[in-house]
Image (tube, grey):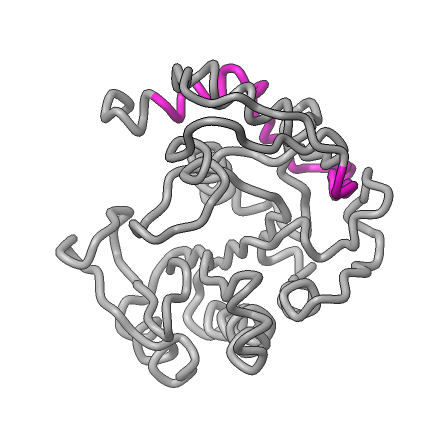
Amino acid sequence: MGTWRGGESGIGENGEGGRAALGVRLLDVRRFEQVADAVAEVRPDAIVNAVGVLNRQAEEHPLDAYLVNGLLPHWLRHLCRREGGRLIHISSDCVFLGDRGGYTETEQPDGVTVYARSKALGEIADPACLTLRTSIVGPELRDQGVGLLKWFLGSKGSVPGYVNVRWNGVTTLELAKAVEWGIANPNVGGLVHLTAPEAVSKHELLGLFADTFWKTDVRIVPATEPAIDRTLAPTASGFDYRPPGYAQMLAELRQWMAGGAD
């Protein structure tokens, strides 16, 4: 399952994206019976829930946000119990306000936006499931995507780099590897943090983007506002997947985007 787009989401039996891929179908994940019918038909060994109503859309469509971000994960857990599969659910560091950083898995989410509250509602600590709380950067599925990497690679001239916004998330490719690890290790469950081994500022992250993707037509201008620290501290035992540092992580992403990775 992928990102919610005006009610549409994809579900498939293989790992390939795109509507033409074998076994991929579209459905409205807000219609829980449609989801149940699809799961009953496919009977998957694992469901990876990467559906999300994101920040701006969540504020504009709060009911959809609470349905998709908050209730759908629990419905999928119910379906997995009924059909015998395993749920891997993707959550976000945005469940936290971001006033101090170093948040552990046991701390109570304190975010106040619709997105934050709906994502917190959807988190599942059940050891039979695996919830990966993280933050991601990577290529967009849509031309109109607004992710940080797409924005930066499409920019020219001066761009702001936030020196007081701290981040220790992962690339989308690294998230996919962690999900694959989670599928291969079904005895590891609960709510865990997926992070890089180091934290960087968004200013430093843009510099890493520029170095990795040979971006020479931008000038990253330090900006002191806003000040946000949603860095996560991975403390849960048993989750032994360890992402590499950003230099390697981004180099692998660049290779994958160029079609050179397996």
Q: Quadrant of the N terminus?
A: bottom left
Residue sitting nearer the eye, 230 or 89: 230
Looking at the image, which residue is at 49% across and 62% down? Answer: 52
Q: Residue at x 52, y 61 (%)?
A: 54
Q: Would residue 181 be visible to someone looking at this image?
A: no
Residue 140, located in which quarter of the rendered image?
top left
Residue at figure coordinates x 68%, y 53% from the top left: 94
Residue 20 percent coordinates (x, y) = 13, 56
**Image x and y of residue 139, in percent:** 38, 39
The quarter of the image holding the C terminus is top left
Task: Look at the picture and state if 98 lies above or below 31.
Answer: above
Find residue 62 and report its image quarter.
Answer: bottom right
On whether residue 247 falls in the magenta region, the answer is yes
Q: Is residue 109 above or below residue 74?
A: above
Q: Residue at x 84, y 53 (%)?
A: 107
Position of 213 relative to 226 (above/below): above
**Residue 253, can we see it?**
yes
Q: Quadrant of residue 195?
A: top right
Q: Main secondary structure of the magenta part?
A: loop
116 and 89: which is toward the camera? 116
Where is residue 88? Give x, y as percent.
51, 54
Q: Is residue 41 left or right of residue 220?
A: left
Residue range in magenta is 225-254
Report the side of 110 relative to 42 (left or right). Answer: right
**Residue 83 belongs to magenta span:** no
